[in-house]
Image: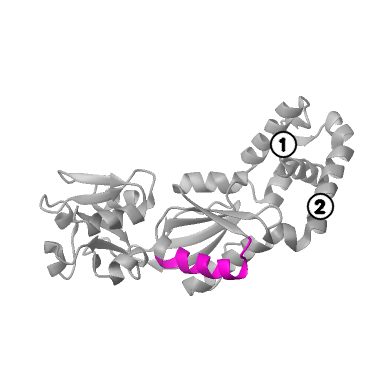
Amino acid sequence: MRIEQLEYIAAVTRLGSLRRAAEELHLSQPALSETVRNLERELGVDLLERKRSGATISAEGRELLPHIVSVIEAVDRLRGAAGDQHRVSRMIRLGTANTATVPLLIPAVREFRATHPVTQVEVVGAQQSEIHRALLEGSFDLGLVNYLRGDDVPPSLETTELLRGRPVVCLRPDSPLAARPTVSAADLLDEREPLIVMRSGYLMHRFIHRLLAGRAPSFSYATDGAEMGKLMVAEGLGVTVLPDFSVIGDPLERGGAITYRPLADGGATEVLLVIQRRRSGSVPRAVRDLHELFVRHAGAPAATTP
């Protein structure tokens, strides 16, 4: 049982319908309904009366409502009593799809540690869908994910744009392709230079599939995340395609182990790096502080989705 489930029941009761509660909570109606059903199965009671005209609190739910409200109020009192100790002395779990992890994440976490010495930051690599699910379930506090310009953003998550860039080819300085001012899709299909692609489920996998129009090189590698891809490039295993902000400023790029070239075709596509957190519920101070550090280190205005 989670406190959010009880808050959802209270919202349905206060607003008189599942639809209006979903709108206020910035959740889809099916997601809200399923969350309530999980609570009903756990309690063994139908909390909502579902009709064709909509869903409202059931008679059994009204009997339990004072207990639900009491729990919510008790949690609020506990949060208030704990104050800054609750909001600072905790662990922050950050999910990341690994693109731009080193150039952006490390400086932000380093500064955060200086001002929050007792707060642990756990960085977990995951795909975008896994990060979204963990944010909604509450097991992640923040998420760093990528979108292509025009992609839909989940309305249940607060999304702030950090970086905006273009896809580039990441390669070694001694690669034959490094002598060219730009690299084409045909070059990426060339057998002389293996292509390192992100595994299915990553945004750059989708971009490469679109760039190559479904074609595939005769030999390629697949890997999880940009950081491993850059290491493989540095070791001479091939080339990969990443957003420019993932390569520029990376320690491997600063040290001369990797470099990049613009794409001759497909390079006009915009790739966004955003930071996301769940809309509902209180946000601990430490999470807010780390969120603000990411925005500041990205040098981006806090452009947040409504």
The residue under the point 49% across, 72% down is: 297
The number of numbered discs placed on residues in the rendered structure image is 2
In the figure, 220 relative to 83: above or below?
above
The residue under the point 11% across, 63% down is: 176
Closest to the observer: 29 or 65? 65
Report the side of 33 relative to 273 (left or right). Answer: right
Which class describes the residues within 10 Å of circle 2: few (<14), some (14-19), or many (20+)?
A: few
Whether 186 is among the magenta residues is no
Residue linked to disc 1: 1
The residue under the point 48% across, 67% down is: 162
Q: Position of residue 207 (x, y in %)?
A: 32, 53
Instruction: Label 2, secondary structure: give it.
Output: helix
What is the residue that sits farthest to the front in this orientation?
118
Q: Position of residue 15 (x, y in %)?
A: 79, 47
Query: Which amino acid lies under the numbered mark 2 shown in the image of this protein?
Result: Leu
Q: Position of residue 67 (x, y in %)?
A: 87, 38
Q: Nearer the viewer, mark 2 or mark 1?
A: 2
Which class describes the residues within 10 Å of circle 1: few (<14), some (14-19), or many (20+)?
A: few
Quadrant of the snapshot with the N terminus = top right
The residue under the point 79% across, 57% down is: 82
Instruction: Label 1, secondary structure: give it.
Output: loop
Q: Is residue 159 visible?
A: yes
Q: Position of residue 274 (x, y in %)?
A: 49, 61
- Which residues lie in the magenta part? 103-118
Which label sits on residue 79? none
Residue linked to disc 2: 78
Query: Which amino acid lies under the numbered mark 1 shown in the image of this protein?
Result: Met
In the figure, 214 relative to 157: above or below?
above
In the figure, 274 relative to 155: above or below?
below
Report the side of 62 relative to 109 (left or right). Answer: right
Q: CA distance from mark 2 to mark 1?
A: 17 Å
Closest to the observer: 56 or 207? 207
